[in-house]
Amino acid sequence: MGFSRGQAVAFLLMTALVVVAPFVLYPVFLMKVLCFALFACAFNLLVGYVGLLSFGHAAYFGMGSYVAGYAAKVWGFTPELAILAGTLTGTGLGVVFGWLAIRRQGIYFAMITLALAQMNYFFCVQAPFTGGEDGIQQIPRGRLFGVISLQNDMAIYAVVAVVFLFGFLLIRRIVHSPFGQVLKAIRENEPRAISLGYRTDDYKLVAFILSTAIAGAAGATKALVFGIATLTDVHFAMSGEVVLMTLLGGLGTIFGPVMGAFVVTAMENYLAQFGAWVTVTQGVIFVACVLAFRRGIIGELGAKLRLAL
C-alpha cells in the first residue's frame, strides 16, 4: 500500500530535514532525537495500532543498548553487527516477555510489562557485564563494515539517519499491510476479530516482538552514538518518557512519535539552564500542549488538514 499524497509530502519533508539539519544544529543532539524518535515509533506500533499499553519498553531499549555496547567494546563487533546484536536482544526479550504478558489486557497487561521491566532493571544492577551503576563506558564507535571510521559526528549521523529511516519505513509498511489492518481490527473490537477467525493472541505477540526489536535497535544505536550504556536506559522513567513522547506527538499516527520525540528531547536540552525549574517549565508546556492538542500535535494538524498523518 503506497503513501497517500499527504503522507508522501510529509515523508519527503521529514527526510529533507534529516539531511539538512546537521548543517544547522548540533549533530549529537539530532542523533539523540532520531534514536528516541525510532524508540517512540516502536512503542506507538504497539499502543497506537494494537491498543496494548506497555509500561516496560525501557527494558528492550536499555538491554539493546547494553548488549550493543558490550559487543562493540569487549567482543570487538563492528557498528552494524553491534546494532544487530542489540536488535536481536530486544527481539529475544520480546519473545519471552510477550509470551508471559500478551494473554492479559488493559491495566493487567500494563502492570505485567512494568513488573517484567523492573525485574530486568534489577538484573542490570547486579549483572557483571553491565558495570552496575557505572554502566558500560567508552564504547567505541568503530568502523562501519570494518572500513569506514565513525569517529566523526557527521559520519555516524549518516548511519543513525539510515537506521531511523529504515525503521520508520518498516513500521509504516507493517501498519499499512494486511497484518496491520488486522491489528487495527483487534484494537477496535477484539471479540469481533476473534469471531472472524483471527487468532488475536498470535497477532498481538508478533506485533509485540516487532515493537521490542525496533526498540532494541534504537537503544543499540544510542549506545554507539554516546559511547555509554547506563541504568538510565532501563529505568522505568524511560518507559514513562516514551509514553509522553507518543501522546504528545499523536497516538496512532505515523509521524506523531517523531514530533513528540523532537519536542521532549529539545525541552530537555534547551531548558536545562533553568536548573530546578526545568521540571515545572516542562509541566506547564505539557499541560498547554494537552489542552491545545487533544489528539497530539500531529493528530490535530492532520485533522485540520484532513490528512492521515
Image (cartoon, rainbow, N blue to C red):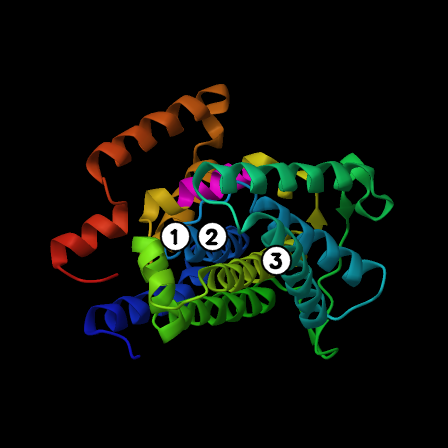
Where residue 301 appears, x then y in whole percent? 19, 52
Query: 89 or 50, which is in the foreground?
Result: 50
Q: Is residue 8 left or right of residue 206?
A: left
Q: Earlier in the sequence, mark 1 or mark 3?
A: 3
* Image quarter of the C terminus: bottom left
Decide whether residue 275 is among the magenta residues: no
Label number found at residue 216: 3
Q: Residues within 10 Å of mark 1 (few under 14, many from 20)?
A: many
Please tell me how many numbered marks the rendered image carries: 3
* Residues at discs 1 and 3 in contact (Cβ within 8 Å): no
Residue pictured at 74% horizontal, 36% vertical = 122
| Residue 202 in view in this figure | yes
Q: Name the residue tied to disc 1.
A: 257
Query: 279 or 294, which is in the foreground?
Result: 294
What's the residue type where badge 3 is placed?
A: Gly
Label number found at residue 43: 2
Q: CA distance from mark 3 to mark 2?
A: 11 Å
Label number found at residue 130: none
Q: CA distance from mark 2 to mark 1?
A: 9 Å
* Residues at discs 2 and 1 in contact (Cβ within 8 Å): yes
Query: 203 or 241, which is in the foreground?
Result: 203
Q: State which region is magenta.
A: 238-245
Q: CA distance from mark 1 to mark 3?
A: 17 Å
